[in-house]
Image (cartoon, grey):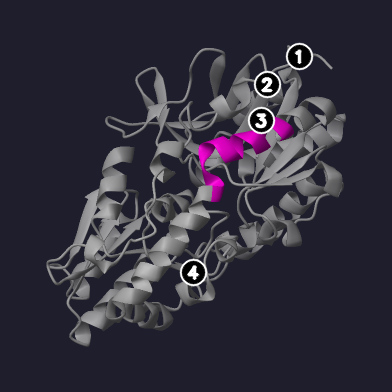
Amino acid sequence: MNPKRSITLLMDGNFLRLDQRVVSPHMAHRKFAARFIQDFAHVRIAARSFPVQNAHGDLVTWERTEFIDLGGHRGVKSLAMHLPRLLWRIWRVVRKSDVLLLRFPGNLSLIAMLMCRLTGKAFSTEVVADPADYFSESASRHPLRKMARAVHCWATRSAAKHGRTARYVTTEALQASYPPREPSHSFGFSDVYLPDRILIGDHSHASSSDEPSDHVFSIVNVAMMHNESKGHSHLLYAVAALRGRGMNICLTLVGDGVLRPDLEKLSARLGLGDCVRFTGALDGESVLRTVKAHSLFALPSLQEGMPRALLEAMSLGAAVVASRVGGVAEVLEPVSLVPPADSAALGERISHFALNAQFRADQKRRNRKTARRFRFSELQKRYRHYCEALKAHG
């Protein structure tokens, strides 16, 4: 076994480019590449990056960590226009990689897997979401949705089957749909970054008195607005219904993306202009402060693996309502879960939380206790074992 081997991670992540710097709110070096740097000589991240004027996030690169830019295309049309150049770039990454790790689902990882299968190049697989949910009827209106769903479900199953190792961000949920070829080479744990300091201390006496005391039941959601998979519209409809019933309720939406103008128009059309606040993207510390300042964290997603925003909220001791998708049911009790794309059920569950202060306090304690399993020191132990397997089998 060569201790000087490098690892290349190829994915469809949304990285941001500020001049010559690549930044990310969730996959900055200390939150992502640093997980591997103790076990590999170099870490290379191959993905798209999108030029921006301003961005919240930290540097993706650092000492012994390199970012390989695969372009800035979005959507099927742009992909087709840039396909020859993209294929060449991906092939160079695949050909030059030592240990190759592909994250699914994604267009770029699908292309890379096909290249590996054609040439006999070894690769390992990470499954971070279920494409069946992402391309469901409620999550996507694209005319090629059914075709995309079939292709990406096949690709994710194939990657799990043929990868030398397979890691999932869930304990059981994604494994059931996309089983690995070798269970002994399979791993199931999240890549969330929860510093131990957040979870230090005894919060066993948390109660409703810890919440804002302005007599308004406040809800917060943290999710990007690039597509409909985060379920923002269902949350707005639920809040509108509760307001119509006379409930004093407000909503803060943290995040940004191309759908934000449409969501703002929907909010106005529902008569929510005075009780819904769009903050745009915030830096990490501001997100934590915002979540702590609200009575309930709501995540009405139509597709998830093991959502980082959910685990971060739980680590703060937040009461949570979320859709039963991906691995969410692995960390939340049934009383906190609702069917995806069901505004009525979401509204009823929010109402239950709003009217039962002791129930909220109990859920806060329970959520914080659950989140301790995901603190950095605990997950890093699992990463070290995982990296040993990558070096041995990748």
| Mark 1–mark 4 distance (CA, rounded to whole Å) | 43 Å
Residue 87 disc label: 3
Q: Nearer the viewer, residue 80 or 88?
A: 88
Residue ID for mark 4: 323
In front of the other: label 2 or label 4?
A: 2
Which amino acid does the dot numbered 1 rest on? Pro
Residue depicted at x 75% and y 43%: 166
Residue picked out by circle 1: 3
The CA distance from mark 3 to mark 4 is 37 Å
Local crowd at mark 4 within 10 Å, few (<14), some, or many (≥20)? many
Q: Secondary structure at mark 1?
A: loop
Q: In this orientation, which residue lies closer to the viewer: 18 or 176?
A: 176
Query: Decide: marks 2, 4 in contact (CB < 8 A)?
Result: no
Task: Report the quarter where the N terminus lies.
Answer: top right
Going from N to C along the chain, the mark reached first, 1 or 4, is 1
Q: Name which of mark 3 and mark 2 comes first in the sequence.
A: 2
